[in-house]
Image: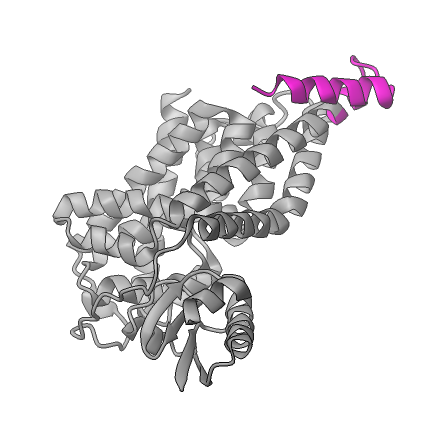
Amino acid sequence: MFKPVQLFADWLVHGVFGLGRETLAGGAVNFFVFDTIKIFLLLAAIIYAVSVMRTFLPPSRVRDIILKKKRFTAHLWAAGLGIVTPFCTCSAIPLFLGFIQTGIPLGVTFSFLVASPMINEVALVMLFGMFGFKIAALYAASGFVLAVLSGLLIGRLRLEGLLEGFDQTKRVQNAVLGAEMAWSERRAYAKDYTLDILKKVWPYVLIGIGVGAWIHGYVPQDLLARWAGADKWYAVPLATLVGIPLYSNAAGIIPLVSALTEKGVALGTTLAFMMAVTGLSLPEFMILRRVMKTKLLFIFFGIVGAGIMFTGFLFNFVMR
Amino acid sequence: MKTIQIFGGGCAKCGILYQHAEAAAKELGMEYRMEKVSDYEKIAEAGIMATPALAVDGKLMLEGRVPTIAALKELLK
């Protein structure tokens, strides 16, 4: 599928720049040119397609679908629909209240809240582009299971008392939107959204792929295996902790991590790191503080964090 | 006299929607009153789950996106 891109990269690097195929610089620059073009093509196409789909699934419709499901199925639907719903920190509160106040259980809401930021199209495209289909699918599947299980657990713990002062008994009526979107509006929305995201992530992607290409070309093979191989117990928790403050930089971090994995970081560690980057975010933590008590936030972070580490250990163990 | 409400917690997009909506209302030559709603509970009470959102005379017209001025004119008619 990306043969023409590879041909172009070969031509540009070896032909125009005159860098030899066998030289370190030639290899690194070729890697950089090929990956950059490939990633941006993928990002543009996938984000556009997902955005068009989203115009058919506004959050209020997502909420209505989940509302009709019972118990366990509700968790599955919440996690599944979380994947296709964009998650932005500024909308987190209305989204959360919209769920709780229409009567969606807290646990089900959390299933949604875990899946939505963790399994997003930018992270999936980057994973697919840098690691291939298998790893991207593995990541999505683990994220989904993690979202369902942590939501189920939070639901079991009956933590409704830890929500911050808003009237939980006041059932908000479902809002009815005035008009359906026309196709031209869906396309305009998708174009704007795609450009928005690309504008936001492009420097990170370039830097990530650039540093990744350098590591790919210059860092000796298996250098990192000694410190971050599958047999190092501390690698997974450390990766999870480091991932938390790197929120919203998934686009730049994944190419970097891909290069590190090549140099010996174990796969489970990599997955845990990326899940922590996307799924645990400090800005989200701060904003959710307005609707839930700090204790509930810590329980939420604790459960998801523990789940991420478990996933990391599991894959390190299985793939060894 | 129509009341145009813009819901949002103060993100950049909410400001743009406010400007677009006001420009659209002006171009239509309609009588209008702009209102900003930034209180999270009020936003949730209106049944809004994605900001920015826009309501005309209490009727929710759109959420989570910023249409062009031309598209808003259609919506406000």
Q: Measuring 72% from the left and 30% from the top, which residue is drawn there?
A: A214
Q: Position of residue A186 (x, y in %)?
A: 45, 50
Q: Quadrant of the N terminus of chain A?
A: top right
Q: Quadrant of the C terminus of chain A?
A: top left
Residue A100 location, quadrant:
bottom left
Q: Measuring 51% from the left and 76% from the top, which residue is drawn there?
A: B28
Q: Position of residue A172 (x, y in %)?
A: 21, 71
Q: Residue furthest top?
A: A22
Magenta run includes residue A217: no
Magenta span? A1-29
Q: Is residue A51 above or below residue A10?
A: below
Q: Is residue A189 above or below residue A45?
A: below
Residue A293 location, quadrant:
bottom left
Q: Is residue A235 visible?
A: no
Q: Position of residue A141 (x, y in %)?
A: 34, 33
Q: Measuring 44% from the left and 27% from the top, which residue is drawn there?
A: A135
Q: Measuring 83% from the left and 15% from the top, which residue is drawn there?
A: A20
Left or right, A216 with reference to B74 = right
Residue B42 location, quadrant:
bottom left
The residue lying toward the viewer, choosing from A83 and A26, is: A83
Count all numbered tags in the image, as a single digit: 0
Left or right, A127 with reference to A41 = left
The residue lying toward the viewer, choosing from A152 and A88, is: A88
